[in-house]
Image (tube, rainbow, N blue to C red):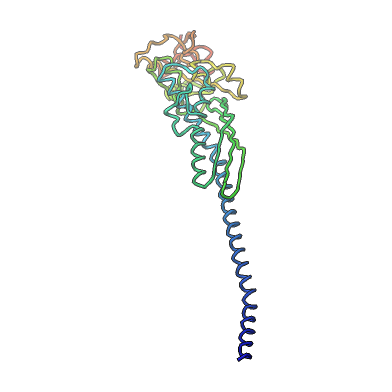
Amino acid sequence: MDVMRRRGIFYSLMALALLLPISAFALYSAMHAQESGASAVTEVVGRETSNFAESIELDFPRALSIAGRTSLTAAVNHIVSSGIAADDAQLRVRELAWNGTYYEIPSALMSNNSLSEWTSRLESKGGAYGLNVTATVTNVTVFPYDSFHLLFSANMSLKARSDAYQMNLTRSLSAEALVGFDGIEDPLYPLNTNGLVDRVIAENSTGVYGVDALDDFFNQREYLPSSQGASFLDRLEGNPLLSTRYASMTARVAGMESLVDLSQLLAQGVDIEENSTVVDYLYFNATTPAGWRVEGSAYPLLILDNVSASEFGVGLVG
């Protein structure tokens, strides 16, 4: 029995000796798997955080473009509804695009379209990723680019933090957006007709020279680049002429001009300047130069001054 007992103890010790390394290996494997799992999760969170930041970087110019375009429509809407020109169009458009306000009063048209509201949505979206996000837009600027575009630019500080995984991401972003105002109402018309007449800006793409081209330009109520006619920002301020201020902000031609359709004014009961040129920056000026009918034109109320007639390559009757 002693022999059998000793053999049983011996075999038990042998089995234990074999099990110890196996148990140790199993324990090590479990611990290593846990560490690997945590590392894998951290890697996924890091990748998702980076993707989130990259999506914001791609979306920034688009958000700036939307805010810029909407700010132009909103600015015109406030001017038309109040009948009061902007005191500083550059400042007001910038305020609308950035904060969604006009003279610090929230603008209904800017709802969900301003840069400040966009950044608020980013911070909420970050929460869905388990991130504490702070997005701050700074240095929003608006400048004339050419006759039919404004250039918007802005910077943004982006911070994303994950407390659970001790992860921080910080980026400084910048964006530019070239915003056109083709299809937006020209504020000069309602401001000069007590809100009775409107005109939507439409860029001419063919050039205007000769009677036929001039008649088509007049009939389509289009706009041409001009070194004397008001820029869009000038028009928001009620100025018919291109100001030195806005002209100096770009190396390109910043102004534009159209021809006033006097029949449209008469149809709305607006008094007209008779025998005066219908070039808008001259017609809406305090002193309107005299004009004469265009020779060969199909439109009796297409009246130009001598200088404008020469530029359009047409003769005058009278």
Q: How many marks?
A: 0
Residue 199 position by quadrant: top left
Residue 296 position by quadrant: top left
- Residue 95, can we see it? yes
Would residue 217 appear left or right of 134 to someone viewing this image? left
Would residue 136 appear left or right of 260 to someone viewing this image? right
* Residue name at image x 42 percent, y 9 percent: 273
Quick one: which residue is furthest to the front in this view?
A: 2
Q: Is residue 108 above or below residue 127?
A: above
Spot occupied by residue 222 in the image (x, y as percentages of width and height): 46, 24
Which image quadrant: the N terminus? bottom right
Would residue 223 appear left or right of 35 to someone viewing this image? left
Q: Nearer the viewer, residue 79 or 239?
A: 79
- Residue 205, can we see it? no
Q: Nearer the viewer, residue 159 or 304?
A: 159
Spot occupied by residue 128 in the image (x, y as percentages of width and height): 49, 46
Spot occupied by residue 259 in the image (x, y as percentages of width and height): 46, 18
Q: Is residue 135 above or below residue 190?
A: below
Spot occupied by residue 315 in the image (x, y as percentages of width and height): 49, 15
Q: Nearer the viewer, residue 225 or 39?
A: 39
